[in-house]
Structures are given as C-alpha cells and as structure tokens.
Amino acid sequence: EDQVTQSPEALRLQEGESSSLNCSYTVSGLRGLFWYRQDPGKGPEFLFTLYSAGEEKEKERLKATLTKKESFLHITAPKPEDSATYLCAVRGSNDYKLSFGAGTTVTVRA
Amino acid sequence: DGGITQSPKYLFRKEGQNVTLSCEQNLNHDAMYWYRQDPGQGLRLIYYSQIVNDFQKGDIAEGYSVSREKKESFPLTVTSAQKNPTAFYLCASSKGSMNTEAFFGQGTRLTVV
C-alpha cells in the first residue's frame, strides 16, 4: 500500500526566513509525486508534478525536489501570502488513486 | 472557464437522511475522484472512476455510493449507513494518463445536525 508522511506538521516562519518541508513516501512504481497548496475552507491548488529522482520544479518562491524516497518543498524568502497547508501526494503504478500525506501547515509572520 | 464545480458549498443533514453532493467538470477529463478531509488528517479516497459507467471503491467507501453516467458528472451520495459523515468533501478530476495531476473543486462541507 502506498504511504506518504509529511513533516513537520506545522511550521512558523518569519517573513524572509527560508525553510523546507519534507515528504517521505513508499510506493510501488512511482508514476508521479504531486505538491498542492490548500487555503482554509478551499480545495487544494495544484503546484508541481515530479516524476523521477533528481528532478526539480520551481514556481516563484517555491522549489520542489525529488529523490527515490522523499521530496522537499523549499520556500525561499517567504511572504505572509505563502501561509497555507502544503499537501504531498503520490500515484503508484498499480492504479489511478492518489495517496496523500496529512500536510504541513505553514504560517509566515510579517 | 474550465474547472470543477461542487455544489452546494455547505450542506446540513439530519441523522438518518441520505444526501447527494454534486460534482461537475468541463475539463474533458476521464478520471474523477471523491476524497474526504477531516481536521488534522490527510485526504482519504472514497471512490474513483477511470471511465464512464465504471468506478472503484477507495479506502473508505462504506456508507457512500456513486454513479458515473456522464463523463462530466460524478455525484456522491452519503447514505444513512455512514456513521460519521460530518466532514469536508472534495471532488477531483484528471486526464486518462496515470502520470497526470488531479485538479480539485472547492469542496462541500457536510454537517449532520
């Protein structure tokens, strides 16, 4: 069974203080690792897809990286508007379903 | 605009009643999904459908039912057999390829009163 573990559960940052979120996974035949951002009371918003170890994707202050066992979401010089819950999900080769971690809630203080 | 529309945004149900949550997409996606989200927990898969007239149970299907009569629509019924239905329900869709990301609607918050 596919498993996804995210750490830390919560992260409080000062504006401009860079940090990283971790997503550890076990999956049979990775077909994709996905990062989402979720604001309170809203549906998750897609950020990145990573397919193979060594791959990196960037969007504004966010950068996602992938190894064979984990993925990192790096937040560089965060702003208060980066405050959200960040979700990681994987899809394996066995079926179509996405398996999600519990998320990391990031709070950025001005 | 292309996207996924869930309705209603808020839903209140009396104990013992069945309720149906609507999910419509105009992205021409083949696959659709229903997830449940509880505070402090990750999204848990209820049902998913890879193609019209076909669907599979997810990890927590008990007390729920779905249909997929049209490509655009994937309604979820929360039956009276679901013991703890109060939650945030999210619908998603993706292209047919297993490599592609899923896109989510804005969710329906169901409360049992």
Image (cartoon, rainbow, N blue to C red):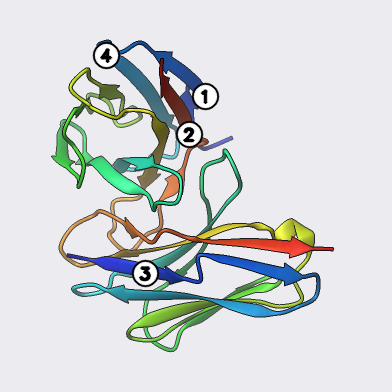
Give the percent coordinates (x, y) of residue A101. 38, 61
Do callouts 1 and 3 mark residues in contact (Cβ within 8 Å)? no
* Mark 1, residue position: B9
Q: Comparing marks 3 and 2, which lies closer to the viewer?
A: 3
Q: Residue furthest right?
A: A110
The alpha-carbon separation of the residues under discs 4 and 1 comes to 17 Å
Give the percent coordinates (x, y) of residue B86. 38, 28
The alpha-carbon separation of the residues under discs 2 and 1 comes to 6 Å
* Mark 4, residue position: B18
**Chain of the residue where label 2 is placed in the rendered structure:** B
Is the residue at mark 4 from the same chain as the one at mark 1?
yes
Q: Comparing marks 4 and 1, which lies closer to the viewer?
A: 4
Q: Which mark is residue B107?
A: 2
Identify the secondary structure beneath mark 2.
loop
Looking at the rendered structure, the kind of residue marked 3 is Thr
Image height check: is A54 above or below B22?
below
Q: Can see residue A26?
A: yes
Give the percent coordinates (x, y) of residue B16. 25, 11
